[in-house]
Amino acid sequence: MDEPSKIYRVGDATITRVLEQRLPFKTQTLFADFDPAVIEEHGTWLKDGHIDATAEHFILSVNTWVVRVGGKVILIDTASGNHKNRPFSALFHQLNTPYLERLARAGVTPDEVDFVLLTHLHVDHVGWNTRLNDGRWVPTFPNARYVFSSAERQHFDTAAGASRRMVFDDSVLPVIEAGLAEEIGPQGGQYLPGIRFHSTPGHSAGHMSIELESAGAHALFSGDVWHHAIQVYRPAWSSMFCADKSRANASREWVLERAADTGATVFTPHFSGTSAGEVTHAGSGFTWRFL
Ligand SMILES: [Zn+2]
């Protein structure tokens, strides 16, 4: 887990990963439509860190991507965070990972972060927005603008659902109250030169994918339109975490087309291995190659 992360160059941008944790999920739990035939069909690459030795669990990562472009430091999603009460899931409850040390190894101190761009507001994407300081949740990146979808904020800023409220209160509300938050409207759109939010709903109400274009090259930060690279080959599979499966399927198809058509390097929050790769058209479907 502590292997140095690759540095990708996309146009004038450099992009590297901070890996928070790797998580196993039972194949048929993660995907209700799971078909064991895919293990036979794709076993060669799956066995290279994308499925466990028994082939009963898919392996997922939880990542932040660090982007440097135009003299700015940008984080895409902030993983799960430390010391957070998550009684609804042992995977995220009271973590104590060396995330900030890994961020430092990627050359970034919290004060240097200019922007935190969030694909959506789930527990494993907003955690390091805040850190515990004298019993209070304070912004981890005090000089950053935190940017996220207004539809996500409206969905999570509600009394409905204790777990939803809990994540919002300790990881999103403190950055809003500190005056550091900005919202992107439901259609998405350009936020910074060369950086654009695209509405890709389904996994969550106001989910966004984030595209970077620099010197004619493209990077696509997909967010959770997918969780495992097997979904490139089974794009009709939505995960157990997807709120609206038919919209999630449509968004997954859109990301596949967009990535293939632009030749983008695709950076994912949850694929195992390097978590990054490229999509190409193959017959009526697509193939994935890890980079
Ligand atoms: Zn996620």
Image (cartoon, helix red, strand yellow):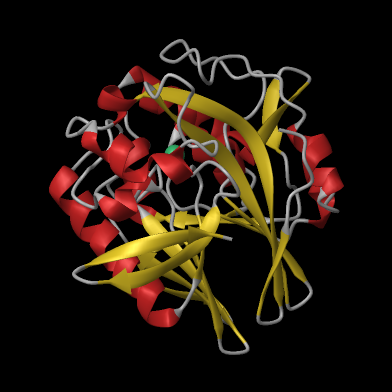
Question: Which sits in the foreground, 214 or 289?
Answer: 289
Number of marks: 0
Q: Residue at x 62, y 47 (%)?
A: 64
Q: Is residue 207 left or right of residue 98?
A: left
Question: Which sits in the foreground, 146 or 80?
Answer: 80
Q: Quadrant of the N terminus?
A: top right
Q: Residue at x 30, y 65 (%)?
A: 286
Q: Is residue 98 left or right of residue 202?
A: right
Residue 257 placed where, x, y %? 30, 72
Residue 211 placed where, x, y %? 48, 71
Question: Which sits in the foreground, 79 or 140?
Answer: 79
Q: Residue furthest bottom?
A: 216
Residue 206 seen in the current view = no
Residue 129 placed where, x, y %? 62, 40
Indicate the quadrant where residue 194 lies. bottom right
Please say if 190 is above or below 103.
Answer: below
Q: Residue at x 38, y 71 (%)?
A: 280
Please say if 244 is above or below 118.
Answer: above
Residue 189 placed where, x, y %? 40, 74
Q: Quadrant of the C terminus?
A: bottom right
Please say if 56 is above or below 112.
Answer: above
Q: Is residue 243 left or right of residue 7?
A: left
